[in-house]
Image (tube, grey):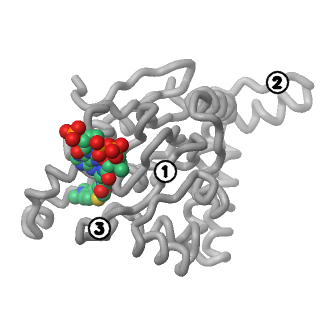
């Protein structure tokens, strides 16, 4: 039984709602464990094709739980290695969409950056306030933001610890879409259902190849893409997609 999240599914879309509204969805260890376990469960579930992560109207997540962090020591972190849990998010093969209303700060921003697409409200606020707490982003923030914005802009935002508006985040390619606050969930689900109709194997092979582009040389990336291209040809969905085209009907993909 989950204590810090709610999870449900809707026509092939698995939804995870962060649910600690009294602390703006501050991420404690238990909540991160529940999120990761639920992501892995959706990833294994053949009926789920796309995953949505959302918060509430005030916050996606206002960072890691500061009360909990206060108790940490270098040794407790080294021994527990809580970041290993976060690494599991990067291993999820299905598309993950973040629906962001309000604050996505610190670990909350990092959680959104672990997602493949980010849909945000006009009044969403993104940022890394860690510098004001005497630490630094630890769940990949310095790496994710730098890969998207470049060194100078990432340094400016992470050093100053200021909150970025949705417009600025959109300008730098940090988020995909901006919509009115009351439409964030609707637009995210619309996009999720649209993706859920695509060939699931294509989606996962594309996700792997596109994410790899950030780390590989052009030649290495092209070789990975090619391997995935060959792999797609052993799926029933490839036959179905191409046959449907020649028969002038919409394809019906089964993820096989
Ligand atoms: N932790 C704990 N409680 C929090 C919280 C947080 N991060 N953010 C908000 N709250 C609580 C507030 O204390 C307040 O509780 P009560 O006073 O009502 O008991 C309640 O949520 C409502 O917050 P505010 O009253 O402050 O609401 P406002 O609208 O006035 O302000 C705010 C919203 C987002 C600007 C403000 O709450 C704020 O500055 N929050 C803290 C932002 C922040 O510094 N976040 C932490 C960044 S460091 C790790 C993985 C990841 C990380 C670290 C370790 N491991 C795996 C080990 C990540 C680190 C971070 O995220």
Question: Looking at the picture, how far across and down is residue 203, in whole percent?
Answer: 63, 43
Question: Looking at the picture, how far across and down is residue 40, in whole percent?
Answer: 37, 38
- Ligand 1 within 8 Å, label 3 CB: yes
Would residue 110 be found to the left or right of residue 240 on screen?
Answer: left
Q: Mark 3 or mark 2, which is nearer to you? A: 3
Residue at image mark 1: 125
- Ligand 1 within 8 Å, label 1 CB: yes
As measured in the structure, the alpha-carbon distance from the residue carrying label 3 to the one carrying label 2 is 53 Å
Would residue 132 be found to the left or right of residue 113 on screen?
Answer: left
As measured in the structure, the alpha-carbon distance from the residue carrying label 1 to the one carrying label 3 is 17 Å
Residue 231 higher or lower than 83, as above or below: above
| Disc 1 residue crowd, few under 14, some 14–19, many 20+, Cα 10 Å | many
- Tell me the tag on residue 132: 3
Q: Residue at x 24, y 66 (%)?
A: 133
- Tell me the tag on residue 250: 2
Q: Which residue is at the far top?
A: 11
Label 1's element? Answer: strand
Question: Looking at the picture, how far across and down is residue 86, in whole percent?
Answer: 32, 53
Q: Mark 2 or mark 1, which is nearer to you? A: 1
Please state which of residues 233 and 49 is positioned toward the viewer in this rendering: 49
Q: Which residue is at the far bottom?
A: 152
Mark nearer the N terminus (3 vs 2) = 3
Q: Residue at x 62, y 29 (%)?
A: 183
CB under 8 Å between callouts 1 and 3? no
Question: Looking at the picture, how far across and down is residue 47, in whole percent?
Answer: 51, 23
Image quarter where the C terminus lies is: top right
Would residue 80 be found to the left or right of residue 236 on screen?
Answer: left
């Amino acid at each position: 039984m989950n204590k810090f999240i709610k999870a449900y599914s809707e026509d092939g879309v698995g939804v995870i709602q962060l649910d600690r509204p009294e602390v703006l969805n501050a991420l404690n260890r238990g909540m991160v464990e529940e999120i990761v376990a639920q992501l892995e469960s959706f990833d294994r579930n053949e009926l789920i094709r796309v995953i949505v992560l959302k918060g509430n109207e005030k916050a996606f997540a206002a960072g890691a739980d500061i009360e909990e962090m206060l108790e940490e020591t270098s040794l407790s972190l080294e021994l527990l290695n809580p970041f290993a849990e976060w690494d599991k998010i990067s291993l999820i093969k299905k598309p993950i969409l973040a629906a962001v209303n309000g604050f996505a700060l610190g670990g909350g921003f990092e959680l959104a950056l672990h997602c493949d697409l980010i849909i945000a409200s006009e009044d969403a606020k993104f940022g890394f306030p860690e510098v004001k707490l005497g630490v630094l982003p630890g769940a990949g923030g310095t790496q994710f933001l730098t890969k998207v914005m470049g060194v100078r802009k990432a340094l400016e935002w992470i050093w100053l610890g200021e909150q970025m508006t949705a417009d600025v985040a959109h300008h730098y390619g940090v988020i995909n879409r901006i919509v009115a606050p009351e439409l964030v969930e609707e637009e995210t689900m619309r996009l999720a259902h649209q993706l859920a109709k695509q060939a699931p194997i294509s989606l996962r092979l594309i996700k792997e190849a596109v994410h790899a582009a950030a780390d590989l040389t052009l030649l290495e990336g092209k070789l990975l893409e090619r391997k995935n291209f060959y792999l797609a040809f052993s799926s029933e969905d490839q036959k179905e997609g191409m046959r449907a085209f020649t028969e002038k009907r919409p394809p019906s993909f089964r993820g096989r």
